[in-house]
Image: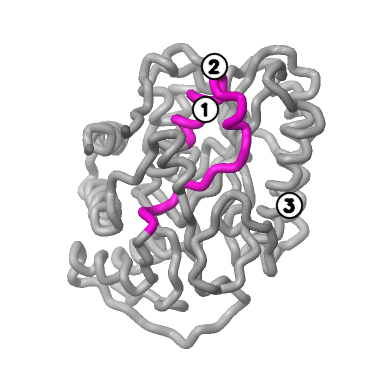
Amino acid sequence: MESMVDATYWNNKKVLVTGHTGFKGSWLCHWLVNLGADVTGFALPPTKDQKLFELLKLDNRLNSVDGNLNDREALQQLVKDSSPDVIFHLAAQSLVLTSFEDPLETFTTNIIGTANLLDALRTYRKSCDVIVITSDKCYQNKDDHKQYIETDPLGGIDPYSASKAAAEIVTASYRNSFFKGNESPIRIASARAGNVIGGGDWALNRLIPDVVRARIAGESVKVRRPGAIRPWQHVLEPLSGYLLLAERLRTQPDFARPWNFGPAAQVTTTVADILESIQEQWPDLMLDIMEESGPHEAAILMLDSTQATTQLGWRPKWNVVNAVAETANWYQAWLEGQEMSAFTTQQINNYCENR
């Protein structure tokens, strides 16, 4: 039985979203505000690459607070002032290549930043359901064709992956040390999603944003690892999972544990497959296939989302072709000067209506 996001659940809910100015954070906040939630966001000031937050006019639709995860006192004050019923923790250093350039900042933000937020909840006396968003890269990846399940070992060779594995360990430690049992007012789950695509992502060294920038400039796209397999999915897929999980935590305390949200089990999609789908939308796209180089990245990443499917009733709605088409449609609408807040709302509505 497929489960749907319950709009009535979110009406007037106080929701805190860290990382609300980022790609996933902006999509999530737009959805939550449309559902009637009272949203507070906490993040560093938007960068020039974070145009989506501005395009969706979110600054006027929620309480946006500038701050740093490494400011422990600011986080404690934030939790006190926003008095959240639900927290989605998305704020992070989220780029693999950046983690090689500044590993210490990556570790500090992703590990200590997560600990700072969870520590602020130790003195919070109100009921609160927390979803800590990490990554599919938190698993000890052996580059085999295994689909990782929630109980598989954590690990990471590169700084980014290691930081996400450590964030999961920190989350489990706080949950089991301070918020354990059915009587705890704080319930903490973690969510591990695949490679998300969707309109409004302008981050550096990500496939879709690189494609969009190259197409606008009339240049070829530099493709580093065309054979790399990733759990590609539209951004609305994991976001719907996060919302469903948060809805259930209050009545299902045993759901306070890790969850995977990835594509259908049989789907294995390479970078080249994604580019082929994009070229069907934009035939003028030029590709420059390069020799594989640069820092280590896993060649194969696959998730098993059976737990979410069987226990939450969550399942992907858009296959990779649909995901790429919806993403291309978003950027095309933006290039044409359409009003992107309304367009994004329509994409969310189309997603919710798709059975």
Q: Position of residue 150 (x, y in %)?
A: 58, 49
**Can residue 52 be seen in this snapshot?**
no
Identify the element where label 2 is drawn. Answer: strand
Q: The residue under label 2 is which amino acid type?
A: Lys
Residue under label 2, please give it: 14
Q: Position of residue 327 (x, y in %)?
A: 29, 52
Report the residue at 79% width, 24% height from top.
122
**Can residue 33 be seen in this snapshot?**
yes
Quarter of the N terminus within the rendering: top left
Report the residue at 37% width, 38% height from top.
55
- Up the image or down, 201 lies above or below 275; here it is above
Q: Position of residue 108 (x, y in %)?
A: 76, 50
Residue under label 1, please give it: 246
Q: The residue under label 3 is which amino acid type?
A: Ala
In the displayed structure image, the side of residue 153 where residue 344 appears, left or right: left
Residue under label 3, please give it: 166
Report the residue at 47% width, 28% height from top.
59
**Mark 1 or 2, nearer chain start:** 2
> Which of these two is toward me, 338 or 186?
186
Q: Are marks 2 and 3 in contact (CB under 8 Å)?
A: no
Q: Are marks 1 and 2 in contact (CB under 8 Å)?
A: no
Q: For the residues marked 1 and 2, what is the alpha-carbon distance in whole angstroms?
A: 12 Å
Identify the element where label 3 is drawn. Answer: helix
In the displayed structure image, the side of residue 92 where residue 124 appears, left or right: right
Residue 18: which quarter of the image?
top right
Quarter of the C terminus within the rendering: top left
- Which residues lie in the magenta part? 242-265
Identify the element where label 1 is drawn. Answer: helix
Q: For the residues marked 3 and 1, what is the alpha-carbon distance in whole angstroms?
A: 22 Å
